[in-house]
Image: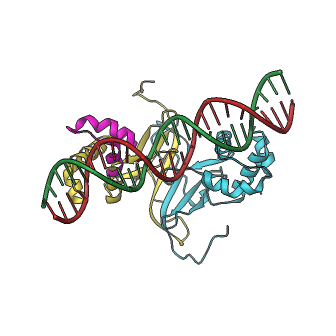
Chain colours: A yellow, B cyan, C red, D green
Amino acid sequence: MHVSAEELLNEKGVKPTPQRMVITEYLLSTDCHPTAEEVLAAVADKLPVSLSRATVYNTLNALVEAGVIREVFTEPGRTRYDANTSEHHHFVDVNTGRIFDIPKENIPHIADQLGEQFKVHSYTVTFFGEMKSEKKRAKE
Amino acid sequence: MHVSAEELLNEKGVKPTPQRMVITEYLLSTDCHPTAEEVLAAVADKLPVSLSRATVYNTLNALVEAGVIREVFTEPGRTRYDANTSEHHHFVDVNTGRIFDIPKENIPHIADQLGEQFKVHSYTVTFFGEMKSEKKRAKE
DNA sequence: ATGCTTGCAAATGTTTTGCACGAGC
DNA sequence: GCTCGTGCAAAACATTTGCAAGCAT
């Protein structure tokens, strides 16, 4: 289903260094919208060399710029990242802070509802609420 | 249309100090979704005494907690504030960063489109795009 | 050699916190 | 007098940047 990280990076014109590939692979493999810090923690030991914080930030910015990933803003103070770049939406569980993807098929198309002075490039819906029956209970 | 800031604060159980009233008044009077820093700059000279950064942050947090204002997340690194607490949406001009309110009447109700495991408390749509004719300057 | 990329550390920017003072109950 | 809000400065975070060194072309 996923193209390889290397292909993806080449496609988007980003030189596929080991650091970038590991970070991209991680983001492609998870749906939990990690912060930069979480990315660092998750991939640091997957590299033979050390991975610095600066490289994580540089890489994430490069990937955003290249359109490989997207930023997600759901909470103050920090940015989360999402390798799902297709138009879709988010549900934030206000108890856990966890973010769930909502496919755009679930949401009617609403980009054309604004006045004509607004030329919409993209839009995203953020739902805040709580999960009703959470079968997979996170440890707390 | 607006209740007075003092009434509003009392209603919400926030002790209406001069600092809090000035900040609340400012937020009620503007539609430009200011950051904490912008709030400070805007109201600092409206008080006979000095207004500290810490008080601005403390106040904004207290107001959010009390439900007087809401946080708006549209960009990395900083929080913006909105005294319009009714459900509504935002359009971000990608050129200027300016944020426009979109009344919820313009958007179909979409809170019920998710699976039933999602209990939605609120949702907000954020549009990214650009203004077509900037001759229609918003009054501010 | 050239040009990116990395890593470290320092710098920046935003927000929070510790603490003393002052106003109001 | 106690409590709470304020102001200042320092601290805590999140992120960016300067720079030297490394890798690939």
Q: How many marks?
A: 0
Q: Is residue A50 visible?
A: yes
Q: Residue at x 65, y 47 (%)?
A: B53
Q: Residue at x 34, y 40 (%)?
A: A39
Q: Position of residue A88 (x, y in %)?
A: 40, 52
- The image quarter in which residue A87 lies: bottom left
Tell which of B8 and A129 is nearer to you.
B8
Magenta segment main secondary structure: helix
Q: Position of residue B64 (x, y in %)?
A: 64, 43
Magenta span covers which residues? A31-58
- The image quarter in which residue A62 lies: bottom left
Whether residue A39 is in magenta: the answer is: yes
Pick the quarter of the image with the C terminus of chain A. top left
Q: Position of residue C9 (x, y in %)?
A: 37, 42
Q: Give left or right: position of B130 versus B3.
A: left
Tell which of B92 and B48 is nearer to you.
B48
Q: Position of residue D5 (x, y in %)?
A: 74, 39
Q: Give left or right: position of A47 versus D15.
A: left
Tell which of D24 and A75 is nearer to you.
D24
Q: Residue at x 69, y 45 (%)?
A: B68
